[in-house]
Image: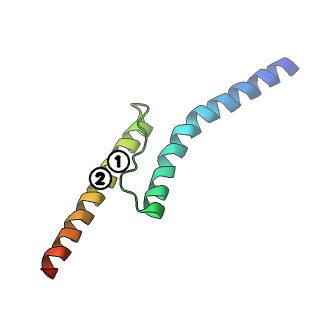
Amino acid sequence: MLLSVAIATIVAVYTSRIITRPINAVTDIPLRVTKEANFELQAPVTTEDKIGNLAHALNQLIQQVKRLLELQENESQMELI
């Protein structure tokens, strides 16, 4: 019985780490992008499941914001000329 509990605990810890690691990686990127204003950062896409889709969509969003900021900066510079 004790062996079964130990095995179940090990499996539960291992499974939770497998699930939370990609989620933590995806949630860390937007925090770093906004804190550092570094739009070169990209979320790692390691799977083709919903988390992978979320990471891919987040990367596209970051790139779109980067493009919009560059356009805005270019327009500001043109106004100064």
Q: CA distance from mark 2 to mark 1?
A: 6 Å
Going by the numbered disc 1, the residue's amino acid type is Asn
- Camera-nearest residue between 13 and 37: 37
Labels 2 & 1 near each other (Cβ < 8 A): yes
* Residue 29 drawn above or below residue 14: below
Viewer-side residue, 50 vs 80: 80
State how the image is colored: rainbow
According to the picture, the residue beneath numbered tag 1 turns out to be 59
Name the kind of residue labelled 2 in the image. Answer: Gln
- Kindly give the residue lying farthest to the front in the view shown: 81
Residue 80 lies in what quarter of the image? bottom left
| Identity of the residue drawn at 84% across and 18% down | 3
| Residue picked out by circle 2 | 63
Please tell me how crowded label 2 is: few (under 14), some (14-19), or many (20+) other residues with Cα within 10 Å: some
Q: Give whichever of 38, 19 is nearer the camera.
A: 38
With respect to residue 6, does 68 lie above or below? below
Report the residue at 24% width, 63% height from top.
70
Q: Is residue 81 left or right of residue 3?
A: left
Q: Is residue 67 left or right of residue 23?
A: left
Of the numbered discs in the image, which one, if any, rests on residue 21? none
- Does residue 8 lie above or below 53 as drawn? above
Label 1 sits on a secondary structure element that is helix
